């Protein structure tokens, strides 16, 4: 009896020690993983926040650069320089100027809204994002008083502030808790592959949509629409004058875009309808942007004979290339390289065309202008897309080797 009691006590103590060791080990592991070596799931928010802060600082630097360029001939303003703050509404103000000043500050408000939302409620986020945009615009207009080549305007401050407010409201709409944000994330999860590579590709897709607002380089909305472009119904009898080399550029651009999107779509979805849906929505967006940035009579010139020929040829070539169900990394890179080569040849044959590769100083004067910034993205997008497709092919090859 005495021996049984001693054995029972030893077993109980052993169980207690084992439980204590297990609990201590779990706590140490928890503390270690949470504090010193965060796992991937915990590291994602920190990396996400870091990317947001970097993007915000880069965009603020871009606004400062575009607002104060050329940073030369600084002079002291007159005593009545601040009169512009209470000046009446100008007699001549264009829709393009107001639209540009609003659109330029929308990304700033969007980034501020996303960053500030982690620290405060919705109303405070909208207030501080709008206030910060107002403050930045106000400082830029004050500094422009020191530059004789720049004109300060209270209309610009008002438009910039509205852009910041719209951007902050857009950040709210894109949250997962809201109906548009939930639909967007569900749509992205349903049709596209998961991962950072696809997220980067969707950002590049947005950059391509912005690049189509360029009025300098050939694109579906570009090519100096004010002269030299006619609607297809006005081109009867003069088809020999149509610039078919521009139709080739359009064809390669449409094909490259379709292959770029198809490389990121889930395999169980049909690629061609999704690519056509994305392309159609982008074209409608560009018509809307052109209506805001250009004269209404120019809209008919978007339907030029060159654009229609390039559209039909590009869709036909894209259909043939997408019949293969494999990821079109190689085909996309080849088409993109051909696209770059043809655009370079076009620039050499047309010296009057302004581009990043021919007249960089001419673009620096308009970096904060929507069309100037779009022209910059129009020139660099093919190279970014080629690099993105190359990285995707390497990821796919490595996954096959490990499988």
Image (cartoon, helix red, strand yellow):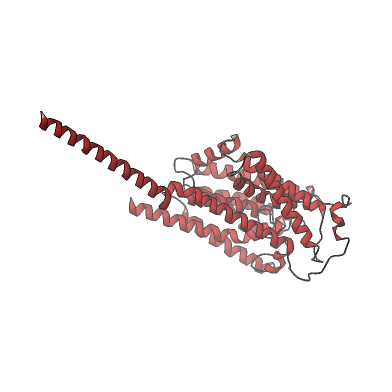
Q: Picture coordinates of residue 177 (x, y %)?
A: 57, 36
Q: Nearer the viewer, residue 79 or 242?
A: 79
Q: Picture coordinates of residue 13 (x, y %)?
A: 22, 37
Q: Nearer the viewer, residue 15 or 267?
A: 15
Q: Is residue 58 left or right of residue 25?
A: right
User: Looking at the image, can residue 287 be seen?
Assistant: no
Q: Quadrant of the N terminus?
A: top left
The vertical placement of 386 against 11, above or below, is below
Quadrant of the image occupied by residue 379: bottom right
Q: Residue at 82% across / 68% down in the picture?
A: 76
Q: Is residue 355 left or right of residue 326?
A: right
Q: Picture coordinates of residue 352 (x, y %)?
A: 72, 67
Q: Residue at 88% across / 63% down in the picture?
A: 79
Residue with the most extreme bottom position: 73
Residue with the most extreme front position: 2
Quadrant of the image occupied by residue 153: bottom right
Q: Picture coordinates of residue 367 (x, y %)?
A: 70, 61
The vertical placement of 1 against 99, above or below, is above
Q: Nearer the viewer, residue 189 or 45?
A: 45
User: Looking at the image, can residue 400 be seen?
Assistant: yes
Q: Residue at 60% across / 63% down in the picture?
A: 342
Q: Is residue 401 left or right of residue 176?
A: left
Q: How many marks?
A: 0
């Amino acid at each position: 009896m005495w021996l049984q009691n001693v054995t029972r006590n030893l077993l109980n103590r052993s169980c207690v020690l084992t439980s204590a060791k297990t609990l201590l080990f779990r706590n140490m592991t928890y503390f270690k993983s949470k504090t010193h070596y965060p796992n991937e799931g915990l590291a994602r928010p920190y990396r996400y926040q870091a990317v947001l802060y970097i993007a915000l600082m880069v965009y603020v630097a871009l606004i400062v650069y575009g607002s104060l360029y050329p940073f030369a001939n600084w002079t002291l303003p007159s005593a009545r320089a601040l009169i512009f703050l209470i000046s009446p509404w100008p007699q001549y103000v264009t829709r393009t100027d107001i639209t540009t000043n609003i659109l330029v500050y929308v990304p700033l408000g969007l980034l501020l809204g996303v960053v500030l939302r982690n620290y405060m409620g919705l109303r405070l986020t909208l207030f501080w994002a709008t206030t910060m945009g107002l403050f930045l615009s106000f400082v830029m207009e004050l500094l422009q008083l020191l530059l004789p080549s720049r004109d300060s305007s209270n209309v610009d401050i008002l438009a910039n502030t509205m852009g910041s407010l719209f951007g902050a409201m857009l950040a709210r709409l894109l949250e997962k808790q809201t109906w548009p944000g939930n639909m967007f994330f569900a749509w992205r999860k349903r049709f596209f592959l998961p991962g950072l590579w696809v997220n980067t590709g969707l950002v590049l897709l947005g950059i391509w949509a912005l690049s189509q607002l360029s009025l300098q380089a050939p694109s579906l909305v570009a090519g100096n629409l004010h002269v030299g472009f006619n609607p297809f119904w006005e081109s009867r009898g003069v088809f020999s004058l149509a610039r078919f080399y521009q139709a080739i550029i359009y064809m390669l651009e449409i094909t490259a875009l379709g292959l770029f999107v198809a490389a990121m779509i889930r395999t169980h979805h049909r690629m061609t309808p999704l690519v056509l849906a994305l392309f159609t929505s982008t074209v409608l967006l560009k018509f809307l942007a052109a209506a805001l940035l250009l004269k209404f009579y120019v809209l008919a010139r978007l339907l030029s004979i060159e654009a229609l020929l390039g559209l039909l040829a590009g869709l036909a070539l894209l259909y043939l290339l997408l019949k293969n169900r494999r990821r079109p990394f190689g085909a996309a890179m080849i088409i993109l390289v051909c696209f770059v080569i043809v655009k370079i040849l076009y620039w050499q044959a047309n010296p009057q065309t302004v581009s990043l590769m021919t007249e960089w100083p001419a673009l620096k004067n308009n970096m904060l202008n929507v069309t100037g910034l779009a022209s910059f993205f129009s020139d660099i997008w093919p190279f970014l897309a080629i690099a993105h497709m190359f990285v995707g092919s390497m990821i796919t090859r490595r996954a096959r080797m490990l499988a």
